[in-house]
Image (cartoon, rainbow, N blue to C red):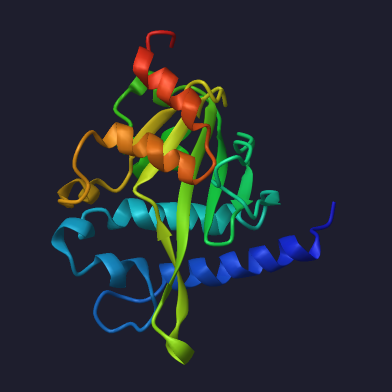
């Protein structure tokens, strides 16, 4: 089935955002690239490989996955996102949901997988959720939309919403004094911001991962 005009427009925006995020260097580029934003900070620079990987995955799969336009993404009262492969577009934020065949996690997203410590979980098939925000920088004619990978990713073995494994993708977030507390609890809260099934994740984390 051919894309709708809305889907074509969304793919075009994503292409522009990912092109800008992937280009340039940390010194001289005017583009809002991952390297320019993160490369000058020693702590954030350690996260550049995983951030670039997340953007590259969005860039690669945005041309082939179905696009779902959800204007109220993450808004209270909105239905949870369906955990099927695709791009979920919320205007100022988006999700890429990737199918992960059994044993293929490292091949698809090596740096993200590196932050998931359980080899047993990584070997399972499932769906990987990678969230992004789109923020405006500058003012007036100099304003530009900038794509930022979020610090958390989520893996759902067997694509089951009741089995959610938050992944600390960008570890430098732990150095932020404003972060504080348990990063897993913060990650579950962040999941709700993107319309991922938060209540089920809270229940799963509370009872542990014994069922798996």
Q: Nearer the viewer, residue 209 or 110?
A: 209
Residue at the image point whose x is 55% and y is 72% from the top: 16
Quarter the C terminus occupies: top left
Q: Image quarter for residue 116?
A: top left
> Relative to 182, is 80 on the left or the right?
right
Q: Image quarter for residue 181?
A: top left
Residue 203 at x, y = what percent?
A: 43, 19
On screen, residue 46 above or below 81: below
Residue 99 at x, y = what percent?
A: 58, 36
Residue at the image point whose x is 28% and y is 84% from the top: 28
Residue at the image point whose x is 39% and y is 34% from the top: 188
On screen, residue 203 above or below 182: above
| Farthest residue, direction right | 1
On screen, residue 202 above or below 173: above
Residue 115 at x, y = what percent?
A: 30, 36
> Relative to 167, is 75 on the left or the right?
right
On screen, residue 58 above or below 159: below
Number of marks in the rendered image:
0
| Farthest residue, direction front | 77
Q: Nearer the viewer, residue 64 or 137?
A: 137
The reply to whether residue 144 is in sight is yes
The reply to whether residue 103 is in sight is no
Residue 65 at x, y = what percent?
A: 66, 49
| Farthest residue, direction bottom | 141
Residue at the image point whose x is 55% and y is 29% from the top: 101
């Amino acid at each position: 089935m051919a894309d709708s005009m809305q889907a074509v427009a969304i793919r075009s925006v994503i292409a522009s955002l990912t092109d800008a995020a992937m280009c340039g260097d940390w010194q001289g580029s005017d583009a809002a690239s991952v390297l320019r934003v993160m490369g000058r900070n020693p702590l954030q620079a350690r996260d550049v490989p995983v951030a670039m990987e997340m953007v590259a995955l969005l860039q690669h799969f945005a041309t082939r996955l179905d696009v779902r336009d959800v204007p109220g993404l993450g808004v209270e009262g909105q239905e949870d996102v369906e955990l099927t492969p695709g791009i979920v577009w919320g205007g100022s934020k988006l999700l890429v949901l990737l199918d992960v065949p059994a044993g293929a996690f490292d091949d698809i997203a090596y740096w993200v997988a590196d932050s998931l410590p359980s080899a047993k979980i990584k070997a399972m098939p499932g769906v990987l959720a990678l969230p992004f925000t789109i923020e405006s920088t500058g003012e007036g004619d100099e304003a530009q939309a900038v794509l930022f990978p979020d610090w958390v990713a989520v893996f759902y073995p067997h694509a089951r919403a009741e089995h959610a494994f938050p992944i600390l993708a960008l570890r430098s977030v732990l150095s932020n004094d404003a972060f504080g507390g348990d990063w897993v609890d913060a990650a579950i809260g962040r999941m709700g911001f993107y319309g991922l099934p938060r209540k089920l994740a809270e229940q799963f984390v509370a009872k542990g991962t014994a069922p798996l």
